[in-house]
Amino acid sequence: MGSRASSLLREEDIDEIKKETGFSHSQITRLYSRFHSLDKGENGALSREDFQRIPELAINPLGDRIINAFFPEGEDQVNFRGFMRTLAHFRPVEDNEKNKDMISGEPLNSRTNKLHFAFQLYDLDRDDKISRDELLQVLRMMVGVNISDEQLGSIADRTIQEADTNGDMCISFSEFTKVLEKVDVEQKMSIRFLH
Amino acid sequence: MASSIYFCLLRTVFLVCFVNPLIQGLSGDVNLVNDRRHQLGNNLTGLPIVTFDWHHVQTPYLVIIWVFVAGLAKLLVIELNHHVINVIPESGLLIMMGFILGGIVWGADKAQTFKLFPPTFFFYLLPQIILDASYFMPNKLFFSNLGSILIYAIFGTCWNASTVGLSLWGCYEAGVMGNLDIGLLQFLLFGSLIAAVDPVAVIAVFEEVHVNEVLFILVFGESLLNDGVTVVLYNVFDAFVALGGPRIDAVEISKGIFSFVVVAFGGSFLGIVFAILLSLLTRCTKHIQIIEAGFIFVVGYLAYLTADMLSLSAILSVTFCGICCQKYVNANMDEKSVTTVRHAMKVLANGSETMIFVFLGVTAIDTEIWVWNTGFILLTLLFVFIYRIIGVFLLTWMLNKFRLVPIEFIDQVVMSYGGLRGAVAYGLAAMLDQDKIPEKNLILSTTLIVVYFTVILQGITMKPLVQWLKVKRAAHSDLKLIEKVNNRAFDHILAAVEDICGRIGDNWWTRGWNRFEENYISWLLMKPKARKNRDYLFSIFHKLNLEDAVNYVSEGERQGSLAFIRSDEAANVDFKKQFGSEFTDVMPDIMVDMSNYELGIETFSVTSIIKDTIPSVSLDIHGQDRKNAMDDVNAHHLLQQHLYSSRKHHRHKYSRSHFGINQSENEVQEIFQRTMRSRLESFKTAKMGVSPAKKITKHHKKELTHKMANGHPDGTGHLYGDEVDSAVGSETGAIRGTFLRDTYTVGAGIENPVVFPDMDSSTHNSLPWLMETDAVAPSQRAQWHLPWTPNRLRRLAPMRISTYSTDSFLMADLEEHEEKPQTDHE
């Protein structure tokens, strides 16, 4: 199965993805076979439905949001490169990478980019600010039904207060980064992909 | 409160009045056995109408009485736990109850007539517990952690045995224990029998301390698998002791090591053989469904005894029998038989466990066996405790280099503290030969004390210890609200991405195995009908995502309005009612699922899905709690309380007294509802076109693609902006098909302009599982013909006309030759 799937993936592609994301060759082929198995339509791209077919995501509070994170703005299909690009955010940070010269200037799995990924999960309208409403939505998704809207609103307000330094009642990305500086993001947002 | 006191009194009265005479009758001389005959023969003066004949029924009566008493003891203990204290674990209380009973018996008899005899224990009490444990074993979890479990079981037990034995011997040589007739070999023998972590005790205590599932499976799996090592070590050292010191050379030692391989693998292999036998049996029992449940127990017991006969590891045999046969047996047997088996297993296992603990207590009250040697006993306790801790930490440090999810510190503490010894150790000690091992009583006493210590003391202190540690850890970091929220969010994100990546275990091996298993093993061991149903189940599970949404709406239609969808109030689809409680068993199992579609549906049954899915959706509309605004402390507390737990916080999945899992089903239900709601809300805002029956899907797709080309459809500014895309892009194609059909048949005229602007009256087809009881009759084909399996799906793939699998389902209903014309429409 692995070999059959990877035969559809050309060496040049693998190399390009390797350069862009930093995954190793075997990791890429492994993830490709996973991509392939998710792709029921066998048309080389995943739709949202393919993701929704994973049962665990239905019972993950942020499941749908994460699915959306794979799809670029306005698009409905994600090809393998896009898939890998998103997954690259979750690659563990290795020390020897800090000196690598990447295309975007910073590897996809750097701390900043990981935080940016998380930030974008909250910030739906992509205005680089988490408004109170957006925060409220996320909170609502993550808590049980027994919390009233008022209570949740207070929590949201308090949360924004903790982070907001310029008083605009929104959390910008820099404020977000700052307030989470003590959190070990590298570890929390990393999956160890088997070699 | 009153009832428990009542029970207490009742029992003491019962015991004193009833059991006493029995015992005295028992301990009367043997001559009485012939009493009746004599009476009849010699003194018969008239026809005896009624005679009292104790000896006629003595043995079975005593057995049953003890079972009864043990049951009462358990009842009392549970009552106590509910009303009085909840500090001592049940097992501890049962042992104490045994003390009391033993005291009564001893008081009446001046001798302990009722001991826990090793044969009784090993043949009649232990097998069903192991069978129960393995039958309900969460397989996916077990096998994904098998490497770690094996390391702990094999190396951990060897480490424990050797270190305890050697240290004790060292102390003996140093003269701490005074004068004993013991040699190195005997110390090693003792070490091997005291080293093994006991499955019975572990389950009993861990049930009260809710730990996460990985930790649980590690300890539990270890306790089951270490029997292989224990048996070998015990037998090897027993033989060595018999041989005598000088005769042991390299050959014998290597034989010992080899015997480990034979015993362990032989036992497992035998278990697998019996599992195959059992599966084949259940495959053929279609016509004697009434007794097929019995086969499980019979064959399981056979596995145990056969392994014991061949001096292989009996526990391993039963373990693997249960683990391997679960899936096939559950698929093959009739639904009622499955339920019967589950209930009966739990009854037997619970009963045995109760009896074991009670008898462990009773056995203690016996002056004959007690030999007190302070040094020996205290040192044993110390070494057992310390070496367990060292062993666990050492092995974990090694394992964490290879594991994906490292085992945390607090888990290691719980693991080392949770290394309880139990009845197995006692049984092995009681089986020692007094002649070969003169200090048998000392060993026995020490074993008993170790068992009591671990079960009672460690059981009591386990919970507080865990809480203290957790609190301690949490106190270090005084997190802000936002950090907490984000931490939890990260957990969820990580879990989701892990699932998308298929988890680390999803490598070539597991997939290859899955395929092999699907094609060959299932073919052999499962009924053909069950196999088809299983494939159907895989597909249906996917459909459930969509289908649940559909039912949701249809139920709303039936209740008269879809207004609740539009509101922000939480309208609940009762998850449990909808899919039956089996589904909630399945769902969490799915969460630890390795591969895409192997759902490990242990307790699922197709008929329940088909029957129960339809009308039993219950919709409650919860009013929102209007509480006052709170202050700072409350915010943290509130958040802590109500945040959904992520996967790593979920509880373990095996329980002695419950079928389901202990975890928060409510949470799962809520999350599921929400996800469905949000996906559903996306449907309703999208324009729903209509098309004639069979071609619904494709036309929709055409419309969809057409719409999409123009950019986003109008989302009516609802919350989940992105989900609009998801609806338009994904499921609407097929789901609208079923959606429309169903809602039309149910609504029978109710049109909700928001959702269904245009309705086509010809959409009558309704798939069986979506049918409402008062629905318009579906087409015959749809009614009776189950959709095709995913195997076909894959073959359909090249001819697919849309990328939506559900299309294929609907289309798969058609005959094969009909597909060709369909493709032309694309």
Image (cartoon, rainbow, N blue to C red):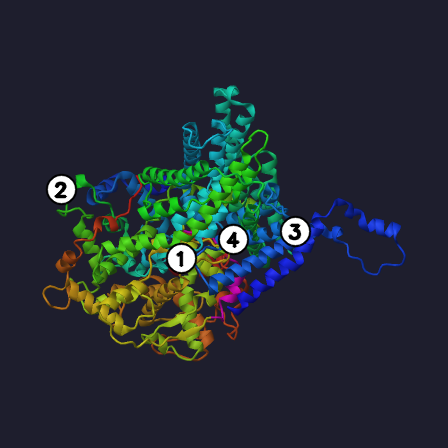
Screen quadrant of the C terminus of chain B: bottom left
* Bounds of the magenta segment: B595-616
Chain to which mark 2 belongs? A
Distance from Cα at disc 3 to Cα at disc 2: 78 Å
| Residue occupying the point 57% across, 49% down | B362
- The residue tagged 1 is B805
- The residue tagged 2 is A101
Q: Are marks 3 and 1 in contact (CB under 8 Å)?
A: no
SS label for mark 1: helix
Work out whether disc 4 and disc 2 sit on a shared chain.
Answer: no
Distance from Cα at disc 1 to Cα at disc 2: 42 Å
Chain to which mark 1 belongs? B
State the predominant SS element of the stretch in magenta.
loop
Residue B79 percent location from the top left of the image: 51, 63
- Front residue of B515/A3: it is B515
SS label for mark 3: helix
- The residue tagged 3 is B63
Labelled disc at residue B721 = none
| Residue occupying the point 25% across, 64% down | B636
Residue B331 located within the stretch drawn in magenta:
no
Please state which amino acid type lies under the numbered disc 1.
Ser
Labelled disc at residue B96 = 4
Q: Quadrant of residue B8?
A: bottom right
Residue B323 percent location from the top left of the image: 51, 46
Q: In front: mark 1 or mark 2?
A: 2
Q: In front: mark 3 or mark 2?
A: 3
